[in-house]
Amino acid sequence: MRRQRVPVFAVLAAVVLITACPYIKPGEDPVLVNSERSLAVATDSIDALFKVDYQYGPVIDAKVPGWKGAVNELRLRAPSILEAANAAVKAYRAGLTLYRADPTQITQAQLNALANDLGTKIVAAVEAGQQAAKVAATVPGGVK
Amino acid sequence: MSTNPPASMTDAWMNLLLALAPLAAGPAGAIAGPLAALVMALIQNWKADAAQNGELTPDEVAAFDAKLAALEASPAWQVRT
């Protein structure tokens, strides 16, 4: 069985290497790019947990006490967190578009306020994504 | 703000998938196919996320909105009874 694990490990290790070196194109707004990227990663992490539970939940329930409750708790919290983060991305993008078109239409302070709100909500989304990974790590043999 | 999936997050998923892999040899052998598909989907999603190096276009924004709405409505995102 261990020999069968090697290809999966190798492929996933490649993913780690691939994701370790992103860059941002010149002229792009790093706050916006980082936020969009982080929201996508968080969403995919949460989705992965939910799909694992959807497919294997009854099997995992028998091995991990509290698994189902932890996943369901995230199912209740995650949508509103992700929606709030997505809305904050949109608000910041709109402010940035306005600022780029005509800096007199929105003050730097107003843009900063949008960025701060965005940061708070993206952090919440990332934390939800990390929570999904922590729940995943509770499976026996799945924690190092 | 981190732009990468934290290594610990990736490790956690990798470990979960590896932990589930032996089940393919047991009574739950039918999960082998779906598990492989899930691994590939994870890899493709993370590669796509990591490849983003610029601001999303309006079409990409709309696509993410649609994706999020579809996920939230999907059976996997509903509370499991």
Image (spheres, coloured by chain):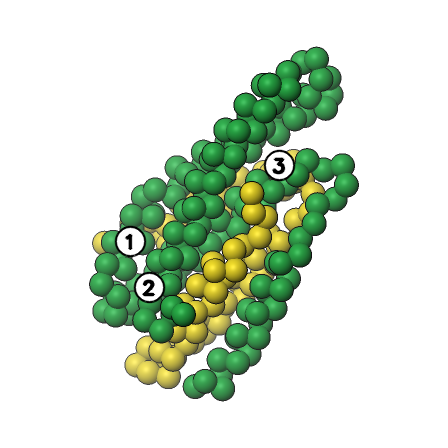
Q: What residue is drawn where x is 50% and y is 67%?
A: B39
Q: Is residue A64 above or below residue B67?
A: below
Given this view, does label 3 or label 1 mark the residue nearer the observer? 3
Query: In the structure shown, which secondary structural element does the residue marked by tag 2 occupy?
Result: loop
Report if the CB atoms under discs 3 and 1 are less than 8 Å apart: no
Measured from the top left, where is residue B62 in percent x and y? 58, 38
Question: Can residue A55 be seen here?
Answer: no
Query: In the structure shown, which secondary structural element does the residue marked by tag 3 occupy?
Result: helix
Answer few, some or many: residues within 10 Å of disc 3's Cα (few below 14, many 20 plus, some between 14 and 19). some
Given this view, does label 1 or label 2 mark the residue nearer the observer? 2
Chain to which mark 2 belongs:
A
The residue carrying mark 3 is: A31
> Which chain is green in the rendering?
A
Observer-nearest of A97 and B65: A97
- State the mark number for residue A70: 1
Chain to which mark 1 belongs:
A
Q: Specify the amino acid type for callout 1.
A: Ala
The residue carrying mark 2 is: A138
Marks 1 and 2 sit apart, C-alpha to C-alpha, by 10 Å
Q: What residue is drawn where x is 28% and y is 70%?
A: A59
Shade of chain B as shown in the rendered figure: yellow
Observer-nearest of B64 and A92: A92
Measured from the top left, where is residue B66 in percent x and y? 52, 42
Q: Please tell me if label 1 and label 2 are on a single chain.
A: yes
Q: What residue is drawn where x is 73% and y is 21%?
A: A101
Which sits earlier in the primary sequence, circle 1 or circle 2? 1
Q: Specify the amino acid type for callout 3.
A: Val
Which sits earlier in the primary sequence, circle 3 or circle 1? 3
